[in-house]
Image (cartoon, rainbow, N blue to C red):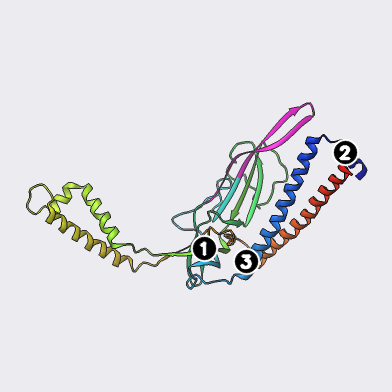
Amino acid sequence: MLESLAVNVRGMESGSFWIVTLLLIAATIFLFFYIWRSLHRARVIEDTPTAKIRSAHQGYVELEGEGELIATLPITAPLSHYQCLWYRFVVERKETRYSSKGNQTHWRKVHDGSCEEPFLLRDETGDCLVDPEGAEVTPTSKDVWYGHSEWPEPGSAPAGGGTQLLGLGKYRYTEERLMPGPVYALGQFKTFNSTGSVRDRTGELLREWKRDQAALLARFDSNNDGEIDVDEWNRARDAAGKEALREQVSRQAEPPTNMLIKTGDRRQPFLVSAFPQTNLASRYRNRARFSLAGTFVALAVLLWMLSVRWV
């Protein structure tokens, strides 16, 4: 068999040979990079201590808790119509190319997307909003099924999840979902206070009042000349400042908002997972092992092709 393959390699046109060679080089480089990437993620997961939301410091933290939907912001997966915390989907259409060499069938992507709405992560000490934009999500489930319309019919998703064995239909639907339940997250923790600047709010109120000239004159035009003079404008500014101060005092009783977001630093990955940290770290280490094996295979094939071609 190897001899037959060697004959084919020797008989390849120069252009085709170098295309295959470059593809093998690219695969080797990519797999080598993926080894480092996966091992780095595993080490970060294992080395970062788990924090409680109430006592978490501002910065890069690891959290574990229950993922819940925000009551005022329900999230519905577009293909299965299941409520979830996060989703990613792809719709593909089967296309066939006819040629003298035979018919070639492939799937062409026609729709794809992912959820960018936040969900709630809760532990026994507090709540935190998780903004999944830019996160590497390990979902709860992945479903693949087929149909005859561009968008699947309601209720057509596999009832038990997984992949539909009979691929009948012109369209293929793939959907991943993170469902309510245990969630592990690693990202940038920030706390936002609801109180703002009194000065900024004073300016906002004055601009709002100026847009309603009739109300402004009725309230502050004390000499009834139809205009707001300097003294009257100073009175309006004082009134706006007092109102802004009252608003700030009333908002101080509101709890601050915690949020987990992307860090912007490649050394600090933003990870969200339905699996606990020990399981997730093992997954990344397994990916590194498979990538290492793939690197050796791609490199061996590359060296073998070069030796057959030139030796």
Q: Quadrant of the C terminus?
A: top right
Q: Position of residue 239 (x, y in %)?
A: 19, 60
Q: Quadrant of residue 17?
A: top right
| Residue in the image at 30% along x and 65% along y | 248
Q: In this rendering, is residue 16 above or below 174?
A: above
Label 2 environment density (alpha carbons within 10 Å; few <14, some 14–19, many ≥20): some
Q: In this view, does 129 lie to the left or right of 90?
A: left
Question: Residue 218 colored magenta?
Answer: no
Which sits earlier in the primary sequence, circle 1 or circle 2?
Answer: 2
**Element carrying mark 2:** helix
Q: In which quarter of the image is the N terminus?
A: top right
The disc at residue 188 is 1
Indicate which label's residue lies in the foreground, 1 or 2.
Answer: 2
Which sits earlier in the primary sequence, circle 3 or circle 1?
Answer: 3
| Residue in the image at 25% along x and 51% along y | 208
State the residue position of label 2.
Answer: 10
Instruction: Residue type at mark 1: give it.
Output: Gln
Decide whether the magenta segment is chiefly helix, strand or loop.
strand
**Element carrying mark 1:** strand
Residue 17 appears in the picture as rendered: yes
State the residue position of label 3.
Answer: 44
Instruction: Residue type at mark 3: give it.
Output: Val
CA gap between label 3 and label 2 equals 47 Å
| Residue in the image at 60% along x and 56% along y | 137
